[in-house]
Image (cartoon, rainbow, N blue to C red):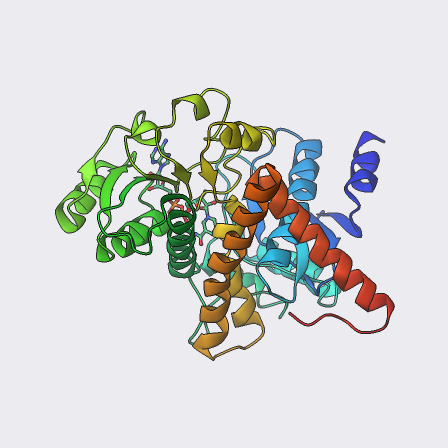
């Protein structure tokens, strides 16, 4: 019953919970909103302690996708799916095809893509049973979202530096990058090309060594990088890094990075505001990837379609920063408000029989 209440309280349109006795596949597909278009969001393959945790994750993540897609200026609503994994057991092709068939039965109301625990190679198997999947890159465009995510974060950092430091360029601006994975390393490279001074940290010594050698970055301990004496901190590794313990110790005046769910709890946004730290809400600044995946799904081969939306990240952040400064509210609350406003506008025009086109 608790689980049912969770679905009602989240306002989800549809939640599909399925088990296939033949393959042993167990999955949940949560469609939070189709107000702006098909519910889009990746599929996570994860070992959950129990089915309730998997459901909570699917509900929370799909709701997050509604807000993210709404502010990314793409004609998609929010959804997410989770496959309940077993420790140390990979998904079989039959399971992936079965998952694809379940997505297909929704007739396009949900579009799936890559997420934690799912590779592009897995998605290609999913795509044998459904066309409602994106991020495959098979048509010769789209594919790996990380370069687009990195570019979006770069434009977001530029917008934040403009707003907080009054600077139109990044020459000599000191940036600490936490995590040099797919996004973090490409971001560090772009920052370096624009003259930023880099501090970097990663659990992988090899990645750090590459950044030191190739980008002239200063290496830092993973425990210290968030608290570096820099202008900008860019979290590009884990979620939850901004919390009541870390925020009082930050020395940067801007936090702007790719990691999802950077705020451990919503009220950490206010803590950042109180400390005068400008925070670029994670789901706004890291939307370059979903923009690219959306473009691929829509068959948008014109690079300008993606590029203009990625530039839009900076414009949108500029508006968020202005509204936050004018109202004293945290940038994360303002972002949520703007997402709700776009959804409300679209719902109104849909009522009038005129779907909003992003
Ligand atoms: P990744 O897995 O390629 O890279 C993560 C990196 O962080 C790895 O190099 C890992 O060694 C490092 N790391 C882990 N713990 C660390 C710690 N405590 N200190 C320093 N480094 C640590 O992941 P990816 O794709 O680069 O994503 C990074 C973040 O951005 C994640 O939070 C992801 O959810 C988010 N994101 C990624 C998108 C994409 O297009 N790949 C899109 C939107 C968000």
- Is 126 rendered above or below residue 156? below
Q: Position of residue 247 (x, y in %)?
A: 45, 26
Q: Position of residue 337 (x, y in %)?
A: 67, 47
Q: Residue furthest bottom?
A: 302
The reply, left or right, for residue 145 in relation to residue 342 is left
Res. 23 visible in picture = no
The reply, left or right, for residue 210 in relation to residue 167 is left
- Identify which residue, 333 or 29, lies in the foreground: 333
The reply, left or right, for residue 173 in relation to residue 310 is left
Q: What is the total number of numbered labels drawn onto the structure image?
A: 0
- Is 77 rendered above or below residue 260? below
- Identify which residue, 258 or 170, lies in the foreground: 170
Which residue corresponds to the image point at 18% horizontal and 49% vertical from the top-left?
215
Q: Residue furthest left?
A: 213
- Identify which residue, 154 or 69, lies in the foreground: 154
Q: Quadrant of residue 154?
A: bottom left
Q: Position of residue 14 (x, y in %)?
A: 79, 52
Which residue corresponds to the image point at 67% horizontal and 55% vertical from the top-left?
78
Q: Quadrant of ligand 1?
A: top left
- Is 350 rendered above or below residue 177? below
- Identify which residue, 321 or 51, lies in the foreground: 321
- Locate the C terminus and report the quarter of the image it occupies: bottom right
Q: Position of residue 309 (x, y in %)?
A: 51, 66
Res. 132 visible in picture = yes
- Locate the N terminus and report the quarter of the image it occupies: top right
């Amino acid at each position: 019953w608790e689980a049912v209440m969770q679905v009602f309280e989240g306002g989800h349109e549809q939640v599909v919970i399925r088990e296939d006795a033949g393959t042993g596949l167990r999955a949940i597909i949560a469609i939070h909103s189709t107000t702006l278009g098909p519910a889009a969001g990746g599929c996570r393959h994860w070992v959950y302690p129990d089915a309730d945790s998997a459901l909570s994750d699917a509900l929370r993540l799909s709701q997050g996708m509604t807000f993210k897609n709404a502010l990314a200026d793409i004609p998609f609503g929010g959804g997410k799916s989770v496959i309940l994994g077993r420790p140390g057991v990979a998904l079989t092709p039959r399971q992936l095809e079965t998952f694809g068939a379940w997505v297909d039965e929704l007739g396009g109301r949900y579009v799936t893509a890559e997420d934690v625990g799912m590779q592009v190679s897995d998605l290609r198997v999913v795509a044998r049973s459904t066309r409602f999947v994106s991020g495959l890159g098979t048509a010769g465009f789209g594919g790996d979202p990380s370069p687009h995510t990195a570019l979006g974060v770069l434009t977001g950092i530029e917008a934040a530096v403009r707003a907080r430091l009054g600077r139109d360029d990044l020459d000599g601006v000191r940036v600490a990058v936490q995590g040099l994975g797919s996004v973090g390393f490409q971001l560090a490279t772009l920052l370096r090309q624009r003259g930023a001074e880099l501090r970097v940290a990663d659990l992988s010594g090899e990645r750090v060594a590459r950044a030191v050698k190739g980008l002239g970055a200063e290496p830092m301990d993973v425990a210290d990088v968030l608290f570096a004496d820099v202008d900008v901190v860019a979290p590009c590794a884990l979620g939850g890094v901004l919390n009541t313990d870390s925020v009082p110790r930050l020395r940067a005046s801007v936090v702007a990075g790719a990691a999802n769910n950077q705020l451990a709890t919503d009220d950490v946004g206010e803590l950042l505001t109180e400390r005068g730290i400008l925070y670029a809400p994670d789901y706004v600044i890291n939307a370059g990837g979903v923009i690219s995946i959306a473009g691929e799904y829509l068959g948008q081969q014109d690079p300008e379609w993606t590029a203009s939306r990625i530039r839009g990240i900076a414009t949108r952040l500029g508006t968020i920063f202005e509204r936050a400064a004018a109202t004293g509210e945290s940038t994360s609350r303002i972002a949520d408000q703007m997402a709700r406003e776009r959804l409300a506008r679209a719902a109104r025009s849909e009522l009038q029989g005129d779907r909003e086109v992003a």
